[in-house]
Amino acid sequence: MSELIRLEDVRKIYRMGSEEVAALDGVSLTFAQGSFWAFMGPSGSGKSTLLNLLGCLDRPTSGRYLLEANDVADLDDDELSELRLRRLGFIFQSFNLIPQLSVRENIELPLFYLGWEEAESAARASELAEKVGLGHRLLHRPTELSGGQQQRVAVARALANDPAVILADEPTGNLDTATSKQIMELLQELNAGGKTILMVTHEAEIAAYTKSQLHLRDGKIQSIEGERG
Amino acid sequence: MRGVTRAVRIGIKDLWLHRLRSLLTILGVVFGVGSVVAMLAVGEGASAQALERIRRLGSNNIMLTATKAVEETTSGQVQRTSVYGLTYADEKRLRESFPSVRRIVPAKLVRKEARLGERSLEVRVVGTTPEWFDLVPRRMLAGRELEPHDLAGRSAVAVLTESGARKLLAVERSIGGFVRIGSFAFEVIGIVESDVGKVGDLPTPDQDIDAYIPMTVCKDRFGDTSQRRTSGSFEREQVELHQVIVDVDDTAHVEPTADAITTMLKRFHKRVDYKVEVPLALLREAEATKRTFNVVLGSIAGISLLVGGIGIMNIMLASVTERTREIGIRRAIGAKKRQIIGQFLIESVVLSVVGGLVGVFLGVAIPWVIQRFSGMPTDVTPESIALALGISGAVGIIFGIYPARRAAELDPIVALRHE
C-alpha cells in the first residue's frame, strides 16, 4: 500500500512555566493509504498531541511531517487551514456540531468554506446524510438527535470534502456500547471503502475494530500491533 | 459576491437566534442615529426658516430706524416735545453721497384711526414713495401700488394691507372707495398682502395693519409732529422720518456702506437717535449659529454613536466567548482566520447598519411629528441620512474588528476544548 503520511523524528515540546514537557519525543512513523489506526496509551502519553499534529491543528517543534509527500511543518496558518479544508476530516468525542445549524447545514459546513454552490452542496449533504442513515433528519437541529445520531452527522460532515484522512478523537467516548458499535462499524465500512482513518482511543474493545494499533507512552512509541503500512 | 451575500444571510440568521439581545444591542445605534437625523432636520428647518426671513428683509438692504435717544425720555408730568429721528436732510445726504446706494425708501409712520363705512380701526399710516413696493415686495391682491404721479400730484390715495382691509370690511369693490384716515379722506387704490415677522430683533418693514400713502401727502396732512396720550399726559414727538430703507447695489458693498452711513449719521446727529441694522449681518450671524449648532450636534452624534459602538463591541465580545467552540469547529474544518473575522465583522456591521436604518426611520418620524403638532418647520436632508448610515456602518466595522480578531486568533485546539 502506498505511503500517505510520514513522520520523521517529530517532537512537540510544551513549556510549562520554566519546565519543558515533551508531549511527543521523537516519533518516526509512516501511515499507508487505506490504513485504520488506533492510537492508544494512558493520558499524557501524547496520543492527542499526535492526532492534533497529524490534523494540522498544531505544528511540531522539530522533525518533519509529510502529508501526501508535502512538507507540512513549514506551512503558515492559512496554508494549514487550506490543507485541513481540502484533505482532512475530523470526528470528535463530543461531536462538535454547531447547535444553531440544522443537520444539513452542519454537513455542508466544509463545502461552504470550499465555496460550493448552494444547490450542489445541499445535494451532497443529503447524499451523505443518507449514507450515514440520517436522510430523514436533514432539517433537525443537533440537540434534537440522540448521541449516536449526532456522531453520524459528524461523520457525514467529515466526509463532505472527500478527505484523504479522517482523524477521530475518541469518537465513541460519549456513546453507549450499542451505539459505539454502530459508529465503529460505520468507520469500518468507510475504511473498507478506502478511507484512511486515524483514531485516538483508550478502550481496547474499540481499538479492536481497527487494523493497526499504536501504543504510546511518555511521548514515545511503545509498540505497534497489527498491520504495518 | 455571492459568498458575501450568503455570509450576510448566515450572520442575520445567527443574530435572529438571539433576537432580544440583538435588539438591545442596536438600541444605542438606533437612538444615536435617530437623534442625529432628527436634530439635523430640526436645525436645518429652523435655519432655513431664519435664512428665508432674512432674505425677505432683503440681504442687500440697510434698515435705518428712528429711535428715541435714551436721555431724551420725557419726565412724564409736563407736556413737552421730543425731537428725534432721521431727517429729510439725512435722506438727501444718503441719496447724494453714497455711490453704492441704488434706491432709498423713506417712510413716515403715524398712528391714525381709519374709518370705512361703519367700521373703524387704528392703522399705521406709512407715508412713503413707490419704491417701498420694490424693497418690500409683497403680492398685490387688488388694485395698484403707489405710483410717482401720486406723489407729484399729491393725490389722497391709500394702499391697505390685506388684514387691515379685511377688518375694515374692504373688498375689491372698495377699490375706488374712500377711507377716512384721521380727518382726511383717501381713495383706496390697492390692497396688498402683508408678510410680517421678526428676524432676531429686526421686524419686517411692513406690519399687519398698514395704510401706505404718498410721502408728500403724509407730510402735508399729518406733519412731523404727533401726539399720543399716555397715562393721562400727552406726549408730543417731532420726527421727520421714522424709517429709511437703503438698497445697496451689491451684497459685497452692504457692510462697508452701512459703516459709512453710521459714520455720516454720527456726524450730523448730536445724539444717537437712530439705528442702523443690516439683515446681511443677521444672515451671517444665523450662518455662524448654524455652524456652531452643527459642531454641537456633531459632538452629540459622535458621543452617542461611540456609546452605541461600545455596546456592539461588548455584545460581540460576549458572543465570541460564547461561541468559542463553534469557532474551534470552523477552524478545524478549515476556515481561515480572515473568514472567522469576516463572519463576526459581518454580524457587527449588520447590527450597526440595521440600527442605523431603524434610527433613520426614527429620525425621519420624529421631525414629522414635530412639524405636524408644533408647526415648527423641519427638513430631513438626504445628506444627513447618508451621513448617519455611513457612520453607523463605520461604527460596526471599527467596534467589530477587535472582537472579530479575537475570535480569529483563538487557538483551534484550545477553542475545541472550550466548554
Image: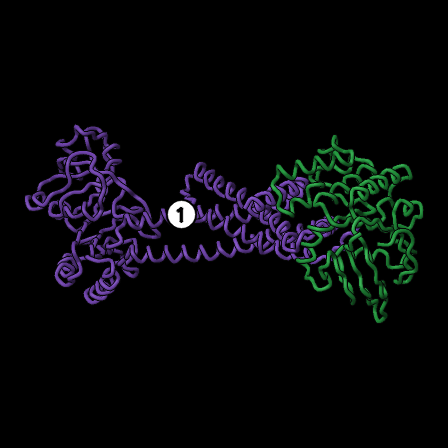
Is A200 left or right of B100, judged from the image as shown? right
Q: Residue at x 21, y 30 (%)?
A: B170
Q: Residue at x 88, y 48 (%)?
A: A211
Q: Residue at x 15, y 35 (%)?
A: B143
Q: Nearer the viewer, residue B100 or B211?
A: B100
Image coordinates of residue B209 in percent, x first then y, are 25, 39
The answer to whether residue B23 is seen in the rendering is: no
Dot 1, how many residues are within 10 Å of its Cα: few (below 14), some (14-19), or many (20+)?
some
Furthest residue to the left?
B153
Furthest residue to the bottom?
A18
Image coordinates of residue B402 in percent, x first then y, are 64, 57
Is B103 left or right of B402, judged from the image as shown? left
The image quadrant of residue B8 is: top right
Q: Nearer the viewer, residue B28 or A226?
A: A226
Residue type pointed to by label 1: Ala
Q: Name the element at disc 1.
A: helix
- Identify whether A51 is placed above or below B218: below
**Chain B colour in the picture:** purple
**Chain A colour in the picture:** green
Q: Nearer the viewer, residue B322 or A90?
A: A90
> Which residue bears the numbered disc 1?
B46
The answer to whether residue A142 is seen in the rendering is: yes
The image quadrant of residue A28 is: bottom right
| Display coloring | by chain
- Identify whether A18 is placed above or below B185: below
Is A16 left or right of B271, judged from the image as shown? right
Q: Quadrant of the C terminus of chain A?
A: bottom right
